[in-house]
């Protein structure tokens, strides 16, 4: 049985999955794994096998747009991931599976501080709630 530790403090779950897969399969694919192993790994990180496959296919950069949005909101990735690791992992999963990636990338490129992302981002409610908290890394608090 293969060993899989999905969450490393302050690291991306997507990067951890991709790193693990590249250790076991050429090109970071899940080809070396049986369906049961894929189901177990998916369960370990709180997603479906299809979601896991999709994330692995996208590679470790799958949630980069989330990190850019967090920078625009002045949310410190390390602080959020350490304070609320489950929330951070869920944000990454939702971002990497989002259908509005092109629009998000375009909006971040044009105006990172714009508000239009709130209309289509499936993470909007969580990011808005996190933005309202008094984070230690923010100079304004």
Image: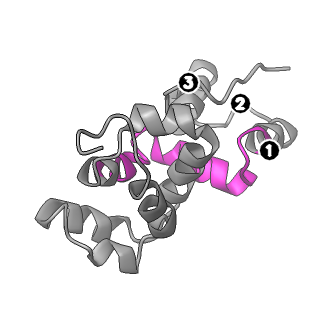
User: SS for tag 2?
Assistant: loop
> How did the renderer colour the structure?
one colour
* Percent position of residue 44, x then y: 77, 38
* Percent position of residue 37, x then y: 82, 35
Residue at which label 3 appears: 9
Q: CA distance from mark 3 to mark 2?
A: 27 Å
Residue occupying image coordinates x 51% and y 61% = 126
> Callout 1 environment at 10 Å: few (<14), some (14 to 19), or many (20+)?
few
Image: magenta residue range: 43-68
Residue at which label 2 appears: 32
Q: CA distance from mark 3 to mark 1?
A: 19 Å
Quadrant for the N terminus in the image:
top right
Left or right: 117 in relation to 1: left
The quarter holding residue 34 reads top right
18 drawn magenta: no
Q: Report the number of numbered marks.
A: 3
Could you say which disc has been placed on residue 87 in the image? none
Residue occupying image coordinates x 34% and y 50% = 70
Tell which residue pokes out farthest to the bottom in this image. 119
Q: Nearer the viewer, mark 3 or mark 2?
A: 3
Residue at which label 1 appears: 43
User: SS for tag 1?
Assistant: helix
Q: Which is more N-terminal, label 2 or label 3?
A: 3
Q: CA distance from mark 1 to mark 2?
A: 18 Å
Q: Nearer the viewer, mark 1 or mark 2?
A: 1
> Callout 2 environment at 10 Å: few (<14), some (14 to 19), or many (20+)?
few
Left or right: 59 in relation to 117: right
Residue occupying image coordinates x 40% and y 71% = 100
């Amino acid at each position: 049985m293969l060993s899989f530790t999905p969450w490393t403090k302050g690291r991306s779950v997507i990067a951890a999955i991709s790193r693990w897969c590249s250790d076991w399969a050429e090109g970071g694919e899940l080809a070396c794994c049986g369906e049961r192993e894929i189901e177990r790994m998916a369960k370990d990180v709180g997603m479906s096998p299809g979601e896991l496959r999709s994330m692995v296919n996208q590679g470790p950069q799958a949630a980069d747009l989330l990190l850019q949005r967090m920078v625009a909101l002045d949310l410190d990735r390390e602080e959020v991931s350490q304070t609320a690791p489950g929330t951070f992992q869920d944000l990454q999963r939702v971002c990497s599976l989002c259908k509005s990636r092109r629009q998000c990338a375009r909006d971040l490129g044009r105006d990172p501080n714009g508000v239009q992302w709130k209309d289509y981002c499936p993470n909007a409610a969580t990011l808005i709630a996190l933005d309202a908290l008094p984070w230690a890394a923010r100079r304004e608090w």
